[in-house]
Amino acid sequence: MRKFERCEKYYSEYKTFFEENKMLGPNAMWLIEILCEKMDLKPGMRVLDMGCGMGLTSIFLAKEFGVTVFANDLWIDPTDNYKRFVQMGVEDKVFPIRAEAHALPYANDFFDAAISIDAYHYFGTDEIYLPIYYSKLVKQGGQFGIVSPGLSREFDNGLPEAMKSHWDPDMYCFHSAKWWHNLWQKTGIVDVTHANSIPDGKALWNLTADFDLHAADFENYLTLISMTAIKK
Ligand SMILES: C[S@@+](CC[C@H](N)C(=O)[O-])C[C@H]1O[C@@H](n2cnc3c(N)ncnc32)[C@H](O)[C@@H]1O
């Protein structure tokens, strides 16, 4: 399995912080490192971290790339996120916001980039989400990047019998990289620059979450997918 050099350096530097603040699903720090290799983030850029959870990826983006981050989430209290941002000394670069994905309080064309780690699939599978909501927030030439739990291919014949007892209804938002590519590319609003299953995606996910589901995945459907795009 690949090494996460950027994360490892970062973990050892902020060991106590990561012991106190556990992640919500598949290792978000690994996923942000994978995604950032496909993006071009530069100091001073304004970045939306959509569905940031506890804001760990937002802190990473501010510290590693010098970008300003709007750490947007629904379930996690922004005051708790703010305390984490203060603790990590990034409170002047990372702004905690609570907003639902269909009621985001940002100006059109405000962001240089919008990223979403382990969150976009919760609200973004709707055909109209990118064209009507999300794409408007990013300026022309701006970047999009997501990493989400997904499928190596769409189910050939429905949900496999063995997976049924471990499957939550909200997992029907898992899709293949090809499915995601088509969802965004057909809008004509963005050019999809990359959409793939992450190499070792299944292993990376299985190391941290959803163990019973993975044990029942005899046909290797589960993986992590990543996608990047540029706004035309
Ligand atoms: C599995 S957590 C991942 C959090 C974080 N990105 C990470 O990887 O640790 C998914 C996040 O998506 C956010 N989310 C889900 N549905 C949302 C919605 N409709 N609008 C805004 N955020 C949403 C939740 O608040 C939650 O923190």
Image (tube, grey):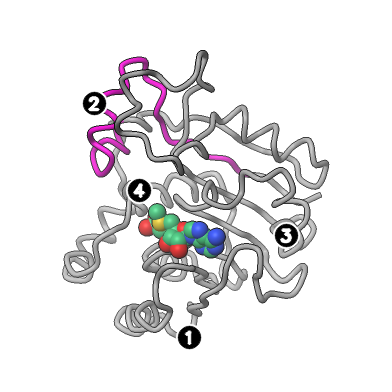
N-terminal label among 1 and 2: 1
Which of label 1 and label 3 is nearer to you?
3
- The residue where tag 3 is placed is 133
Q: Amino acid at mark 4?
A: Trp
Q: Regarding mark 3 in the picture, which secondary structure is present there?
A: helix
Q: Amino acid at mark 3?
A: Tyr
| Residue 101 in which image quadrant | bottom right
Query: Per the image, is 5 magenta?
Result: no
Between the residue at mark 3 and the residue at mark 4, the CA separation in whole angstroms equals 28 Å
Which of label 3 and label 4 is nearer to you?
3
Which of label 1 and label 2 is nearer to you?
2
- The residue where tag 4 is placed is 30
- State whether residue 73 is above or below residue 77: above
Q: Regarding mark 1 in the picture, which secondary structure is present there?
A: loop
N-terminal label among 3 and 2: 3
- The residue where tag 2 is placed is 215
Q: Amino acid at mark 1?
A: Asp
Report the magenta residues as a range: 203-228
Residue 228 percent across, percent down from the top left? 61, 44
- Residue at x 35% of width, y 82% of height: 89
N-terminal label among 1 and 4: 4
